[in-house]
Image: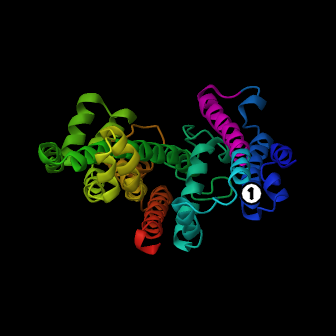
Amino acid sequence: MRYLLSLLVPGLGHLYVRLYGRAAFFLMATLLHTGIGGFAAARGRLVWLVQDVPHRMYKTYWFSSVILVGLLGLIWFWALWDLHRVHRRPNQVGQSYWNLVGRRFRRDAKGLLGAGIILVMLYLALFAPFFTNNDPLKMDLFNVRQPPSAEHPFGTDHFGRDVLDRVIYGSRTALGIGAMATLLNMLLGGILGLLGGFYRGGTDAVIMRFLEIINAIPFLLFALLAMSIFGSSIPIMIIVLGIFGLQPARIIRSEVLSVREEDYVTAARALGVSTGRLIFRHVFPNAIASLLVTTTMSIGVNIIVVAGLSFLGLGIKPPTPDWGAMLGDAQEFFRTAWWMAVFPGLFIVITVFGFNILGDSLRDVMDPRLK
């Protein structure tokens, strides 16, 4: 019966077996995403319900519609899996380290605020066409630099484009590049840190010298050189940020150096456990907490760097919406059109603030001394 109820609506199965907290979570998640879908359908923004989607907007309509359906499917699957897990192992649920971290996090107001800010920005990025009124690239030269109004809540820019729409679409650029660059940081830095900390000796020395060389090169000079040679494309920006953001290597290395001397690692080595299994089964999991905290804060740093490069003209090229480029365009109009600079800058500040306080909260709740 519980599985049938969960198939009908995620969360009803949990309600049936009196898991009220989990039931509330899945019901709210389902209600939120179906509400977004209903809102998009009412506005004619779901790609399957629109007869004549503007050619320039078809890809973004399709992307947001598919993401929404995928998230709803994920919620249904997650609810069924969680219900099955609780039924099979009722005494073990809530006893793991990550469940304890989750409990601490839910009691931390600072972390919840940061997570809320990031979720709002993420959903604006994923479902931008559902929440905007106009094409962010559409110009209206009869309405240039119009102040905020009911029709244009954030005003218009020097080409008559709606600032609110461009700020919302700009979140895709900021979060997308920031997240992908951070993922590359974590991948490269994590591998280098694991190898250096585990093998030590010559391997560690070579890796540390490589990191010191990278840190000695001026980032702006390298970025300017790379953009001049390869162009200011999104993949190039991600690679440049990924190469220069290898600080996680030092953090992972320090964690691995301490973990590799633990008794259980020594015992596993004595039993003949392979090096790969030793690293990824016993050593790496103990460094995940530090890596997660570093990842969260690195996204905020990369968002600022991307905005800075675009502000200087080294980042995303016009007319693609980008917060840094919008600030750059607003320089000469700040006295007469303050809204062109204030709203993109405000979104940068709020987004980075959300990632920073979330990182602080994760660092606090994952500290082993709090166990």
Horizontal relation, residue 118 to residue 76: left or right? left
How was this image coloured? rainbow
For the view shown, which residue lies furthest in the right direction? 1
Provide residue 181's location: percent of width, then percent of height.
38, 43
> Is 22 situated above or below 53?
below
Query: 277 and 33: which one is in front?
Result: 277
For the view shown, which residue lies furthest in the front direction? 271
Question: Which residue is painted at 61% across and 31% down in the image?
Answer: 57
Query: 199 and 14: which one is in front?
Result: 199
Query: 76 and 220: which one is in front?
Result: 76
Provide residue 233's location: percent of width, then percent of height.
37, 33
Q: Callout 1: 10 Å neighbours few (<14), some, many (20+)? A: some
Segment colored magenta: 53-79
| Residue picked out by circle 1 | 28
* Res 200 seen here: yes
Horizontal relation, residue 211 to residue 158: left or right? left
* Res 291 seen here: no
As for residue 78 lying within the magenta part, the answer is yes
Horizontal relation, residue 212 to residue 156: left or right? left
Badge 1 marks a residue whose secondary structure is helix
Provide residue 11's location: percent of width, then percent of height.
78, 53
As for residue 242 lying within the magenta part, the answer is no
Query: 185 and 269: which one is in front?
Result: 269
Looking at the picture, which amino acid does disc 1 mark? Met
Count the numbered circles shown.
1
Task: Examine the image and state in which quarter residue 51 appears.
Answer: top right
> Is 28 situated above or below 162?
below
Give the overall secondary structure of the magenta segment: helix
Provide residue 139's location: percent of width, then percent of height.
55, 39
